Image (spheres, coloured by chain):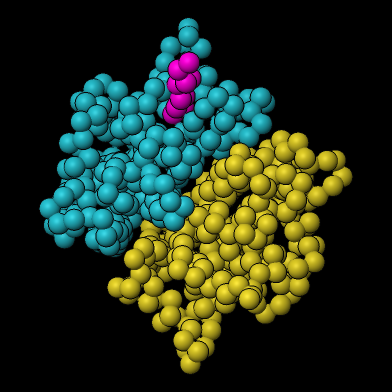
Chain colours: A cyan, B yellow
Amino acid sequence: MARRPYELHYWPGIQGRGEFVRLALEAAGAEYIDVARGDKREGRGIAAMMAYLEGDATARPPFACPFLVDGKTVVGQTAAILQYLGPKLGLVPASEADRLWTHQVQLTIADFVVEAHDLHHPVAAGLYYEDQKPEALRRAREFRRERVPKFFRWFERVLERNPKNLRGASPHVVGARLSYADLSLFQAVEGTLYALPKTARRVMKKTPRLAALREAVAGDKRLAAYLASDRRVPFNEQGIFRHYAELDA
Amino acid sequence: MARRPYELHYWPGIQGRGEFVRLALEAAGAEYIDVARGDKREGRGIAAMMAYLEGDATARPPFACPFLVDGKTVVGQTAAILQYLGPKLGLVPASEADRLWTHQVQLTIADFVVEAHDLHHPVAAGLYYEDQKPEALRRAREFRRERVPKFFRWFERVLERNPKNLRGASPHVVGARLSYADLSLFQAVEGTLYALPKTARRVMKKTPRLAALREAVAGDKRLAAYLASDRRVPFNEQGIFRHYAELDA
């Protein structure tokens, strides 16, 4: 009997944090339902997602989406979802030490994602960007000068110190094969290139391995097909990575 | 042969994120060395910590402290450290499902901690509070009105839905025994009471289980001894939870 498809629950219309999970499911060719993007008449849509978050029936309710439903298991928190899915999708090496490291890298990517979001929302996620623009302009200066270089240099170092990365071959975060952390790193770089193209291109002159990883992931056969499909929501100004030209330099 | 003590690496002088790990080590009565608070003449102190972060010798260098050194294993990211230590210290239930849930709660506490920090540093962690006070005042209003209630209500729901929590007994995040998530929740509440006493007391009128958990953890024999010792760094205005009266209401 075929396994039941995974259910991914996330806001439709944006890539957001859901995209990190979606990339893993797509890269593995896993069957999944993107529940909140589905049809209400089939029991999907946003209401189906909210039932888990706000209803009384979930014994262990996630704090927020994205969350994954796999039979009776409900898992929230992007990094925890990927840690859960990694072994099932073949997107993490087998050893405990390698898995711990992959998760640690993922949590650091998550930290970067928080900062990439708060760049345009330094006062409150609940207010519009237009209502916190002076604060965002200040935050952006620090983010461009200090934070993007610091994170990207660390990502580069991670790739540099992976002993399985051979000169000339596509680099990986851990081991010699594609992991969910590679996919998430691709997404973090892709998002930064969209949001802050000048900053990203400047910083990436000094992170050749990170640039190569991005190319390699984008060229993965399944990933390339996904990225060209309408399942990939385009970057836009409601998501985490937003392009406001005044924040870039 | 006795096992080698764990090494905890974190900035001296503040509780910060290191405290979440320290509480677990202390509650379990584990032997550990607080490396950066140690003596340079014994190979400890801040330089010993920085060697891991900035030196060439660490194959898998953490992005930041806190990190834990356990023999050859180096683990960064607070939530990952606790996930690693939990089973070894007897601070998490045995089942995979319970462990996943405990980690998920921990990651949500970590999200709260980021917001509690950015409250006084909405523009940049690298600038002084005094240089971002107008932005902090705006952020504080949203944090008090929206975010603290949202997180605390979710923590309360977590305690409410744990079927092992019996009426009248001390509540736990998961199962019927102390876990590292209980300790971290205690620290999050304690920190909020320090930073924003008016806000915390108001919100906690509606979160009786969270209040009871805080009391229970503070009353744990080993924890009480630790909290009264000079190993517990007092809250102060260099840490994550800072008391600036103008941010509270």
Q: In which quarter of the view is residue B175 placed?
A: top right
In the rendered structure, the answer to whether residue A1 lies left or right of residue B228 reads: left
Q: In which quarter of the view is residue B249 placed?
A: bottom right
Percent coordinates x, y for residue A121 in the rendering: 38, 45
Q: Is residue A186 above or below residue A157?
A: above
Percent coordinates x, y for residue B209 in the rendering: 76, 45
Percent coordinates x, y for residue A12 in the rendering: 39, 24
Tell me, yes or no, if residue A1 can be seen here.
yes
Q: Is residue B184 above or below residue A239?
A: below
Q: Is residue A149 above or below residue B230?
A: above
Report the front residue among A139 and B135: A139
Q: What secondary structure characterizes most of the magenta part? A: loop
Percent coordinates x, y for residue B72 in the rendering: 45, 68
Tell me, yes or no, if residue B211 can be seen here.
no
Whether residue A9 is in magenta: the answer is yes
Report the front residue among B239 and A246: B239
Task: State how many labels appear.
Answer: 0
In the rendered structure, the answer to whether residue A190 lies left or right of residue B124 reads: left
Residue at 41% of width from left, 47% of height from top? Answer: A94
First to last magenta residue range: A1-10
Residue at 75% of width from left, 51% of height from top? Answer: B177
Report the front residue among B81 and A36: B81
